[in-house]
Image (tube, grey):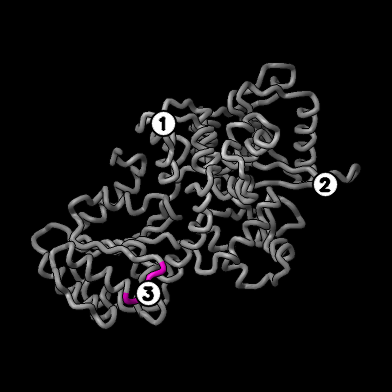
Amino acid sequence: MQNEIIGRKAEIELLNKYAESGKAEFVAIYGRRRVGKTFLVNQVFKNRLTFSMTGILDGDKKAQMHAFTDALDLYGQPNTPTPKNWYDAFQILRHFLSEKMSGNSPCIIFIDELPCFETRKSDFVNALGYFWNSWASLQDNLMLIVCGSATSWMIKNIIDNHGGLHDRITHEIHLKEFTLRETEEYLLSYGFPWDRMMVVQTYMVMGGIPYYLSLLNPAESLAQNIDRLFFKANSEMQREFNRLYKTLFSNPEAYIAIIEALFEKKCGLTRDGIAESLGINANGYLTQMLQSLVDCGIVRFYRIRNKSVSTRNGLYQLLDFYTLFYLQFLKKQTSNEHFWTQSINSPTINSWMGLAFERICLTHISQIKCALGIDGIKTEYYSWRGTDTESQRQAQIDLVIERADRMINICEAKFSEKPYLLSKDEYDKFTNRIALFKQTTSFAGGVIPTFITANGLQRNAYSEHITAQITLDDLF
C-alpha cells in the first residue's frame, strides 16, 4: 500500500504553516469517521511528533489513562504510574514535554479521538483547558493538535467551548471527503483500470471516503467489489452503518430515525416536517440534532424559493452517499450475495443512479460554477418548488444558481452512460418549470437553461435550445 497523501493540498500547507509559526498553536481537526484525519496528521508530521495518544472507543476512564501511560512509554518515558486524574496526567505530560523542547524545532502534540477521553466524571476537557492556559499557550514553537470523528462533540466542547477553552482554538480544519477528481487520483494511484464512468458510479456508492475506497480491489470489477463489500454475508460495509453513527453520536438511534425520515423524502423536509414524520416535538433539541447532522456532512440544510417555506425554516436533505446506498439496498438485508452483479441495468438501479447523480452535482457546485465560467461571480444556490394555479400540479427544480449579474442557471441533472436523448415531453416539462419559476418568483433577470449529464445531450431539435451543458468531465 502506498502512503502518499492524495489531495489535501490546502490542509497540508496550513498544517506546515502552523507548525512553523514560532508561537503556540491549538489546532482542532474534525470530520466524519474514515475521512482520513489521523492519516493526514501522521503523514504530514511523520517522525516529527513529540507526543501522540489516541482515545479508546467505549473505554472507561481507566482504559483512557492506560492509553495515556502507554503513549508516554512509546515516546520515551516508560513505567509511568497511572495518574489519579487528568490534571495529574497533564502535569506529567508538561514535565515530559519540557525536557523534549529545545532550540527552534516545533514541539508537536497530537491527541486523536479526543471525545473518547471525556468519560463520565473524568473532567478531561477542563484539565485540557488548564494545561493549555497555564503552560502550553505560553510556549514558543508548541503545536497542540486535537482530532475527533464525533464532529458535533468537537464543535460544542472544543471549538465553541464556553469554559476554559473559550476562544483558545487558534485554527480549525474541517476535513471533508474527496471530490470526484481526488477519488480518481486515489484509484489511479493504486492501479485501478477504471474510466470516469466507473469512478462516478463508485462515488455514488461510497462517496469520497478514503477508507472505503481503500477496501476496493483493482483485480475485481466495480460490480464484484460492491457485492463483496456490501452484499456478502457479514461484509464490512454492512456493519459500517451502525459503527458510523455510534462513533458520531452518543445516542445514535435518535439520529438514525431522522435520517430514515429524510430518506423517504428525496428533496428534503423542514424541521416541522421531520417532527411530524417522527411524531415528536419540533423543539430546540431537534434543532440541535439536525445541526449536528449538518456539521457531520451527513445532511445539508438549504433554503428554497417558496413562500410556504421560510428562509429560517428551510429544508434538510440527506446527502451522505454511503448512508443513502445502505438504506436503499442493505437495510432489507437481501440474502443474494451477487445482488449487484445480477441487477446491473435494472430499473431499480438505474433510478437510484439518477438520484445519486443529482446529489453528486449538489456536492460539486464549485466545479459546475467553474465549467459555466462564473466561479468569479457571487452566487447563491437553492432548490425551488411551485404550484401551477391552473392545473394545480407541483413543479420542482433541484438546482437553481442565482448570480450577482442578474442571471440564473436553472439546472437539470440527467444520468445515462450514453449521450442523453432529450425528448419533446421532457423539454416541454423543463420549459414549463422555467416559466412557472419566473412567474411565481417575479424574477426579472435572464434565465439560462442548463443540463448536467454524463456524456452530453444527443443532438436533436430540443437540445439546440439548451444554452449551457455540463458533462461528467467538468465535474472532475
Mark 1 lies on residue: 218
Tag 1 near tag 2, CB within 8 Å? no
**Range of the magenta residues?**
58-62
SS of the residue at dot 2? strand
- The residue carrying pointer 3 sits among few (fewer than 14), some (14 to 19) or many (20 or more) residues within 10 Å by Cα, namely some
Compared across the picture, whether 325 is left or right of 20 comes to right
Of residues 198 and 454, the one nearer the viewer is 198
Q: CA distance from mark 3 to mark 1?
A: 40 Å
Q: Earlier in the sequence, mark 1 or mark 2?
A: 1
Q: Which mark is residue 195?
A: none
- Give residue 71's position: percent from left, percent from top: 22, 65
Q: Which kind of residue does numbered mark 2 sit on?
A: Thr
Mark 2 lies on residue: 387
Q: Name the residue rendered at 76%, 23% in the picture.
A: 423
- Give residue 419's position: percent from left, percent from top: 63, 21
SS of the residue at dot 1? loop
Residue 34 part of the magenta segment: no
Q: Which kind of residue does numbered mark 3 sit on?
A: Asp
Mark 3 lies on residue: 60
Q: Name the residue rendered at 53%, 54% in the picture.
A: 241
On the question of residue 374 being in view, the answer is no
Q: Earlier in the sequence, mark 3 or mark 1?
A: 3
Query: Can you name the residue that lies furthest to the top here?
Result: 460
Q: Which kind of residue does numbered mark 1 sit on?
A: Pro
Q: Main secondary structure of the magenta part?
A: loop
Of residues 460 and 232, the one nearer the viewer is 232
Of residues 419 and 141, the one nearer the viewer is 419
Q: In which quarter of the view is residue 260 placed?
A: bottom right
